[in-house]
Amino acid sequence: NIYTTNKIVKIDPESGHVVGYMNFDSLLPDNEKTTRTDYFNGIAYDSASKSIFITGKRWPKLYEIRLN
């Protein structure tokens, strides 16, 4: 992820170049944000379900997403 943002970049492992990005600014609804809510910083991939789990510092939820 890009530090201090709600964005994740896709990096080509051979070239090291950024080849895409995903913006998750609207993932956490405004009514669930507080003055202590911070950018997301928890990203994990589950190869069995092919899901990505995303959460943030002091976020009330863990989100599971799947990309095509």
Image (cartoon, grey):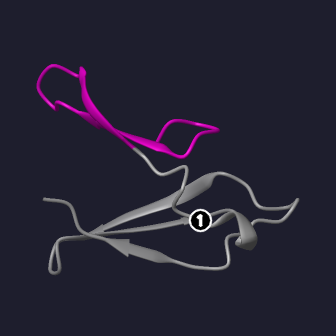
Q: Residue furthest right?
A: 35
Magenta region, residue range: 1-22
Residue beneath the point at 16% across and 32% down:
13
Depth check: 38 or 12 in front? Answer: 38
Task: Identify the residue under disc 1.
Answer: 28
Q: Residue 3 occupies which quadrant of the picture?
A: top right
Depth check: 11 or 25 in front? Answer: 25
Q: Is residue 62 within the magenta segment?
A: no
Q: Is residue 43 above or below residue 25?
A: below
Local SS, label 1:
loop
Q: Is residue 19 above or below residue 66?
A: above
Q: Is residue 5 within the magenta segment?
A: yes
Residue beneath the point at 15% across and 19% down:
15
Q: Is residue 17 above or below residue 39?
A: above
Q: How many residues crowd around disc 1 within 10 Å: few (fewer than 14), some, or many (20 or more)?
A: many
- The image position of residue 68, as x and y in percent, is 12, 59
- The image position of residue 4, as x and y in percent, is 64, 38
Q: Is residue 47 left or right of residue 3?
A: left
Instruction: Give the amino acid type for the residue marked by disc 1 in the picture.
Output: Leu
Q: Residue 51 occupies which quadrant of the picture?
A: bottom left
